[in-house]
Amino acid sequence: MKLNVAVIFGGRSVEHEISVISANQCINALDKNKYNVIPVYISKQGKWYTGNDLLKLENYRDSEKLLAESQKIIINQNSSATNFYKEPNGIFTSRKPVNIDIAFPVTHGTYGEDGALQGLFETMNIPYVGCDVLASAITMDKITTKMLLQTLGIKVLDYFWFYSDKWVSVRDSVVSDIKAKFNYPLVVKPGNLGSSIGVAAVNNDVELEDAVDLVIRLSQRVLIEPKVTNLKEINCAVLGDRDFAEVSLCEEPFRSDDILSYCDKYSGGMKNKSGIGLGKNANSGMSGAKRKIPAEISSKMSAEIQAIAKQAFINLNCNGVVRVDFLIDQNTNEIYLCELNTIPGSLAFYLWEPLGRDFAALTERLIELALKRHREVNNLVVSYADNILKGWR
Ligand SMILES: Nc1ncnc2c1ncn2[C@@H]1O[C@H](COP(=O)(O)OP(=O)(O)O)[C@@H](O)[C@H]1O
Ligand SMILES: [Mg+2]
């Protein structure tokens, strides 16, 4: 019997469009002989939809029309199986249940990759692909990730962080604290976003203040790091769970500027007038970016990076496919773990292809891992059958 797989994408995140592209690739890759694929689109307003029109990227040009032609859905757990109810044009009485066996979130950023959506599936006891609530929440927050990696003995760049309200109330003292710790150039980042949104290199106080002013509109926590000036970036993906984790080849993404930008990542380095956005390779998402696979680094460094990636993946109890990004200071050859992406752009399928695992096989493995975890978690005792309130008076 075919499994009903709900691929969930979009969402209330600044990386909404990237998710639409990643999910489209994932849906195309899933083996239709094994799975009934149900597209589930979460609009920017947080409403849930399904329908075949959601399968074509060109339909997203006119999102109002797309949503009008799609069917709203709600999730209902009060039935024998997990149901997604289609809601045909608001006629409540004729709701048509669609049983789903597994959720496959291909959502990037806030509410989709940070544990929030994972928590919904957890609460409803729906098996889901990828990292669980804890691993998702930790890795989405760059500051917490650094704190934990340090306790594991994994090198991260030195850092300084503060809450945005502190910036608003005592900006001058924050600036002097930063300058007491670091010299320029520095890098300013939101504590919990992705796709380079809000990330800026700064060379003086004016640039620092401008960059932080922008970041506090995006995130409640601000992260400051020294800038690695002679930088090489290397990424490596890990697939599996804590019992069995495989590492991919290392890749070197190419930058058109100081900071690997949104454009570098998703449009092959092409910039449109707004500076960000949709160049000619936009439809290929992260897989359209320029990169070298395998990266041109020594086999010793590559093995070291793979080992660190795996160590971080296992210790943070990751599951599924996670892309672990590193910053190499070429002056010292020091390797710093930069971040873990628990739902990487294009699910990092291109890092597995050279190893003989195509995108379809990757999705199959991810579903296997999700079902395995679901079985394991369901073996844990979460409540007692006995009602201790029975004798209450
Ligand atoms: N400390 C740093 N020094 C130099 N460049 C950096 C530094 N931190 C980040 N970058 C650049 O900014 C990009 C985005 O930063 P990153 O921390 O990966 O955030 P995101 O989650 O948005 O991808 C990196 O890929 C790299 O090009
Ligand atoms: Mg990054």
Image: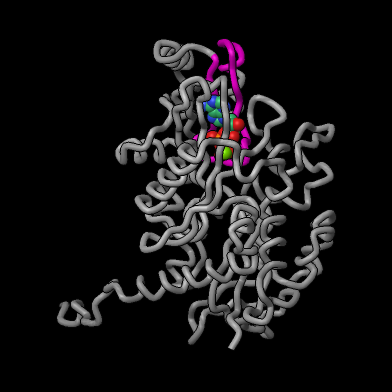
Residue drawn at 75 percent across, 52 percent down: 284
Residue drawn at 52 percent across, 65 percent down: 129
Eyeballing the image, is 292 above or below 3? above
Quarter of the picture holding the C terminus: bottom left
Most distant residue in the front direction: 299
Residue drawn at 53 percent across, 51 percent down: 237
Task: Please give the count of numbered marks on the rendered protein.
Answer: 0
Eyeballing the image, is 159 above or below 294? above
Residue 156 quadrant: top left
Eyeballing the image, is 358 above or below 180? below
Residue 76 quadrant: bottom right
Segment colored magenta: 185-209
Quarter of the picture holding the N terminus: bottom right
Question: Quick one: 126 or 251, which is closer to the camera?
Answer: 251
221 lies left or right of 262: left
Question: Quick one: 208 or 334, which is closer to the camera?
Answer: 334
* Picture quarter with ligand 2: top right
Where is residue 43? Give x, y as percent. 68, 57
Where is residue 322? Give x, y as percent. 51, 52
Where is residue 33? Give x, y as percent. 67, 82
Where is residue 216? Give x, y as percent. 55, 30
Eyeballing the image, is 234 above or below 329? below
Give yes or no for residue 208 being in the magenta stretch.
yes
Residue drawn at 63 percent across, 50 percent down: 345
Give yes or no for residue 156 being in the magenta stretch.
no
Can residue 64 be seen from the camera position used here?
Answer: no
